[in-house]
Amino acid sequence: MAPQLRRKWTEPGQNLSVGELVLVKEATHPLQWRIGRIRELHPGSDGTSRVATLE
């Protein structure tokens, strides 16, 4: 048995963009999660968007 590898946020991933579909993960059953479309991104002081407005 080999240990399971865990990745950290050491490499930048793909950025989100306006118009993309996203899954809105809530504290409900996964089949009840909603799908949203990104309408606007709100970048932070470092230029990375961590907040988005959805349709």
Image (cartoon, helix red, strand yellow):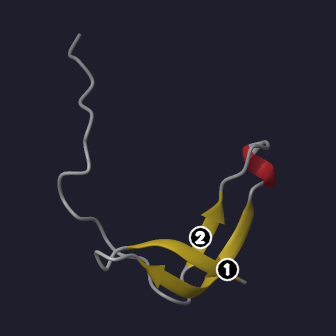
What secondary structure is found at the residue carrying circle 2?
A: strand
- Figure check: 14 above or below 26: below
Type of amino acid under label 1: Leu
Left or right: 41, with 26 as reference point: left
Left or right: 55, with 4 as reference point: right
Residue 49, position as x, y percentages in the image: 42, 75
- Figure check: 43 above or below 1: below
Left or right: 33, with 2 as reference point: right
Residue at x 25%, y 43% (from the top left corner): 8
Task: Tell me the mark number nearer the camera, choosing from 2 and 1.
Answer: 1
Q: Between marks 2 and 1, how big is the CA–CA gap?
A: 9 Å
Instruction: Kindly identify which residue carries mark 1.
Output: 54
- For the residues labelled 2 and 1, say whether their Cβ atoms are less than 8 Å apart: yes
Sequence-earlier tag: 2 or 1: 2
What secondary structure is found at the residue carrying circle 1?
A: strand
Instruction: Kindly identify which residue carries mark 2.
Output: 22
Residue at x 18%, y 52% (from the top left corner): 10
Residue 39, position as x, y percentages in the image: 62, 89
Quarter-wise, where is residue 55 in the image? Answer: bottom right
